[in-house]
Image (tube, grey):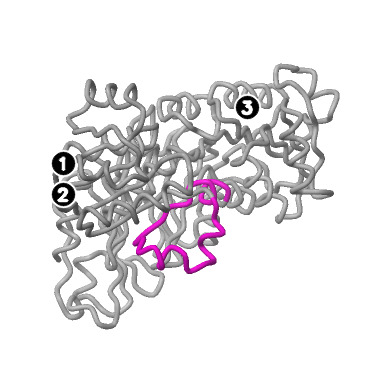
Amino acid sequence: MRIVIAGAGTVGYLLAKTLSFNHDVIIVDQQAVKLERLRDELDVLTCEGNAEDPKTYKKLEIAACDLFVSVTDADEVNLLAPLVAQEVLAIEKTIVRLKNEDFLRTRLLSKLSIDDAVFPDMVTAQRVKALLRHPKANNVKTFHQTACKLMSYKVASLSQDLRVDDVCRKDVRVAAIERDRRLMFPSGKERIERGDLLYFFGCADAIEAVRRRFETGMPDAIANVVLFGADTLALKIAKAVAKEGVALKIIDKHAERCRRALDVLGEKAMVIHSAFEDHKLFEEEGLKYADMVIAATADDETNIVKCVEAGEYGIAKRVAVNNDPSYYGLMHQLGIVAVRGSKAGAHYAILEKIASSQVTTQRHFCGGEGVMFLRKIYPSSPLIGKRIGRYAKEKVLTFLIRQERFIEPEEAGVFKSDDVLAVFAPSAYKEVLQRWIDTL
């Protein structure tokens, strides 16, 4: 594909780095320094200019592009840039990154002929909220094609010898195991070890039932929450958390952010203006009694430090917003639950939008090391009655879900209406798996 990306910041850079291996990528930005870095490090073309100016796209010397992606830091630019570009280029598909989720409740996106929009702040907030509802989980992913969820749990201790098959049922499967920073896709006979991060796929109640066979070290319920940070993303997390009826304390070192937090949340939260560096805050403000600490600043190192301090007071549920993917492994090593921040979230959300279609959905997990595909068999699908197979390659798991039960593809016979095919594999396989599942 020929892809034009408006915005050469962190999200634009990450997208260009990922997409340039298999596609022709052109980056548009006003800042020459950012474009120079891209030219030095990646195999992409660059164009210096205003994304809101038609003259910029005339300089590209192309008549059309398959995909236009707008990922600047301003919603207004991201909405306007595709409209301007369409005056010059024939664009097949448009994806934009937006911060204000109010656009979801209007018809503006369709009026501007925008095909897809990602709202990474909203997704991050909802993922943190899910961790309150499933306090023992490290991560929770939901899907529109099925009631099944992808939920990960850290094995803190084992009271008995367990293998993967021991924690699988007709309605639950272990989709992957992260061990010593390596992602494995189990056959079933593998022994479960202390420190493993197990990825379960199934309905939440069924997953929780099999999860009781080992300890996670996480609390049974969340009543008191501490949130470090009060910027835009942190406030969206705060609003989502406050709706769960927990006692919430917010700490930020910027007075203006604290005032805004008070305006937004009112009596739903206690807002404390204090420098993060003050370790005594855990004692003086009673933060040590929290069931869950969320570090949601824009700086990963600060988030790690606050979570480590919380661990020193015995707080097991420590969640850090992960802005820079290079810190993901360290967070895992320290027993911190890592939740994608806005920029990393936007990167993966856009990749998933590009790869997904009406019949398939692609999702990344384990810091992008793993990929999963879901394909639902709708009543009008040409696959109904066709024999079911699996992708015959090592490290690829294929599950068929029928009436909320897992069936081996060979035993299921032929596809039936409302079946869901789920495939889990290393991210390195995603291109070939995408072609396979789309062309069954």
**Helix or strand or loop: what does disc 3 sit on?**
helix
Q: Which mark is residue 307?
A: 3
Drawn side of residue 180 relative to residue 40, left or right: right
Q: Nearer the viewer, residue 301 or 107?
A: 107
Tell me the distance, in whole angstroms, between the alpha carbons under discs 1 and 3.
41 Å
- Name the disc covering residue 176, or none: none
Please name the amino acid that badge 2 sits on: Met
**Could you tell me which secondary element the residue under label 2 belongs to?**
loop
The structure residue drawn at horizontal position 64% and vertical position 36%, both measured from the top left corner, is 231
- Residue 318, horizontal then vertical, whole percent: 62, 34
Rendering coords of residue 269 (x, y %) = 79, 44
Q: Position of residue 225 (x, y in %)?
A: 73, 41
> Type of residue at label 1?
Asp
Indicate whether 36 appears above or below 190. Answer: above
**Residue pictured at 39% horizontal, 39% vertical:** 366
Residue 114 inside the magenta-drawn segment? yes
Mark 3: which amino acid? Cys
Q: Earlier in the sequence, mark 3 or mark 2?
A: 2
Residue that mark 2 sits on? 1
Magenta span: 100-125
Q: Is residue 307 above or below residue 375?
A: above
Instruction: Count residues near mark 3 (Cα–Cα under 10 Å), then give few for <14, some for 14-19, many for 20+.
Output: many
**Would you name the residue on which mark 1 appears?**
24
- Circles 1 and 2, Cβ within 8 Å, touching? The answer is yes
Whole-angstrom CA distance, mark 3 to mark 2, is 42 Å
